[in-house]
Image (tube, rainbow, N blue to C red):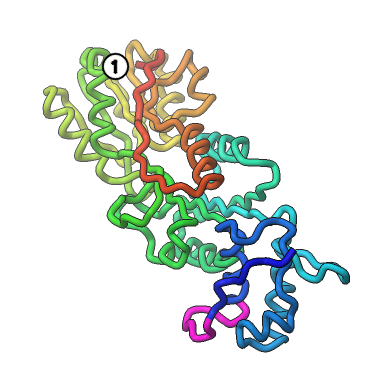
C-alpha cells in the first residue's frame, strides 16, 4: 500500500541537518496519523527525487529510523512503518515515590504497543537542554516536567506544541501549550483554611522550606505567612529542620521528604506524638504516608490522576490546559 505524500523539507532549515529534516518529516507523518503501521515509504531513489536530497542522505536517515524501530525494511516490501512505531518521551525531575505513582498510572493507561522512554533532568538546566535536543525527531509525543513555575524553558519551543505536554510546573501564558499543572499559591491557602479547625490548637506554625534545597516554588512562603497573619498564629520559616527548636504545640508544614524524616525522628526521640503534642503536614502524598504513624496529613495533587490524564492526551492528541486540584488529606498527624 502506497503512502500519502509527505510534507518534505525544503532543505533550507538552519536548525537541523538534512538527515534530521527527513527524520522529522517521517516521524511527523506517523504521529499525526498520515502514516499508519505497515504503510510503505518511498524508495531511497524516490525520496531523493521528492526531497532534492542525495541518495546517501536519504539512506542514512532511513537507517537511523530503522535503528529507532520507527520503520522496517524487507527485500520485497522496501521501507515501511513499523508495527510498534509510537514512541513517547517522559522527562521527569526525579524518581520520587509520588513520581512513581505518576509514571505507573501513565504507563497503565497507554496501549502496550506504545513505547515510553523515561528520563530525568534533576533540575540541571544543561542536562535538561541536552535531553530535549537529543530527543527531537525521535518521539511521537513528549511529556515533560518543566524546570520552574515562572516560565517554560526556551528549549521546549523546539518541540511541536501539538506533541508536547508540560507537567507539574509552568504557566499558561502560551496559548498553544498543553499542560497539566499544580496550583502552588491559592491552593495552599485553601487547604490550610480547610484544616484551620485542627491547626488552631497549636501555638506556632513552622514552615520548613529552602528554595536552594527544593524546586518547590517560592510562592509557598508568602501564602504561608499571609495565612498565619490572617489567623493571628505565630509563625516562622526555617531553611531546614532544627531539632533543638522543637516544642510542644508546634505545627510543621514540611516540603522535603528528608526534613519530614528528621521531624519524625525528633518527635520519637522527645516522645512527642504527632497529632497530639506536635502537628505535621507534608507535601505530596505517597502510599507510605498513608500508613506511617497511623497516617501523615498531606497537601497533594493526585499524581495518579495526572498520569492518567497525560496518557489520554498522548492517545487522543486533543488539546488540554488544566490546573489539577490540590487537596488536604487529613490523617492522624494533625
Image quadrant occupied by the C terminus: top left
**Which quadrant would residue 181 be assigned to in this image?**
top left
Q: Position of residue 206 (x, y in %)?
A: 27, 29
Can residue 214 be seen here? The reply is: no
Q: Is residue 287 left or right of residue 108?
A: left
Picture layout, residue 45 above or below residue 170: below
Q: Nearer the viewer, residue 294 or 266?
A: 294
**Residue 253 in view, yes or no:** yes
The residue lying at 33 percent from left, 19 percent from top is 279
Q: How many marks?
A: 1
Q: Magenta span covers which residues? A: 10-19
Front residue (pair 192, 37): 37
Q: Please report the residue visible at 66 percent of the width from the left and 48 percent of the height from the top.
A: 114
132 part of magenta stretch: no
- Which quarter of the rendering shows the N terminus? bottom right
Q: Position of residue 290 (x, y in %)?
A: 49, 20
Look at mark 1 in the image and give the residue it sits on: 248
Q: Is residue 245 above or below residue 107?
A: above
Q: How far across and down, in percent of the image, does residue 151 sit?
A: 31, 57
Q: Nearer the viewer, residue 102 or 7?
A: 7
Up the image or down, 47 lies above or below 168; here it is below
Looking at the rendered structure, the secondary structure element under dot 1 is loop
Q: Of all residues shown, which one is farthest toward the right?
A: 75
Q: Can you give x and y, in whole percent of width and height, for residue 138 in the image?
A: 61, 64
Amino acid at each position: 500500500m502506497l503512502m500519502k505524500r509527505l510534507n518534505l523539507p525544503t532543505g533550507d532549515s538552519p536548525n537541523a541537518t538534512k538527515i534530521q529534516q527527513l527524520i522529522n518529516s517521517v516521524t511527523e507523518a506517523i504521529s499525526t496519523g498520515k502514516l499508519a503501521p505497515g504503510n510503505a515509504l518511498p524508495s531511497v531513489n524516490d525520496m531523493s527525487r521528492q526531497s532534492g536530497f542525495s541518495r546517501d542522505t536519504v539512506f542514512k536517515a532511513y537507517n537511523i529510523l530503522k535503528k529507532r524501530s520507527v520503520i522496517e525494511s524487507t527485500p520485497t516490501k522496501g521501507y515501511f512503518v513499523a508495527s510498534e512505531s509510537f514512541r513517547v518521551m517522559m522527562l521527569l525531575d526525579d524518581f520520587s515515590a509520588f513520581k512513581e505513582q505518576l509514571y505507573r498510572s501513565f504507563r497503565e493507561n497507554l496501549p502496550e504497543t506504545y513505547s515510553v522512554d523515561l528520563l530525568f533532568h534533576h533540575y540541571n538546566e544543561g542536562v535538561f537542554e541536552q535531553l530535549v535536543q537529543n530527543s527531537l525527531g525521535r518521539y511521537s509525543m513528549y511529556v515533560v516536567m518543566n524546570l520552574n513555575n515562572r516560565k517554560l524553558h526556551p528549549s521546549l519551543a523546539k518541540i511541536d506544541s501539538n506533541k508536547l505536554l508540560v507537567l507539574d510546573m509552568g504557566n499558561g501564558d502560551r496559548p498553544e501549550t498543553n499542560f497539566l499543572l499544580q496550583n502552588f499559591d491559592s491552593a495552599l491557602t485553601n487547604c490550610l483554611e480547610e484544616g484551620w479547625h485542627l491547626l488552631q490548637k497549636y501555638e506556632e506554625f513552622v514552615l520548613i522550606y529552602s528554595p536552594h534545597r527544593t524546586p518547590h516554588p517560592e510562592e509557598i512562603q508568602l501564602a504561608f505567612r499571609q495565612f498565619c497573619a490572617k489567623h493571628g498564629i505565630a509563625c516562622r520559616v526555617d531553611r531546614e529542620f532544627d531539632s533543638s527548636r522543637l516544642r510542644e504545640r508546634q505545627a510543621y508544614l514540611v516540603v522535603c521528604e528528608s526534613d519530614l524524616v528528621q521531624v519524625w525522628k525528633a518527635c520519637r526521640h522527645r516522645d512527642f506524638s504527632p497529632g497530639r503534642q506536635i502537628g505535621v503536614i507534608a507535601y505530596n502524598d505517597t502510599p507510605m504516608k498513608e500508613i506511617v504513624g497511623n497516617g501523615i496529613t498531606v497537601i497533594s495533587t493526585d499524581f495518579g490522576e495526572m498520569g492518567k490524564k497525560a496518557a489520554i492526551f498522548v492517545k487522543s492528541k486533543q488539546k488540554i490546559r488544566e490546573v489539577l486540584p490540590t487537596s488536604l488529606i487529613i490523617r492522624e498527624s494533625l
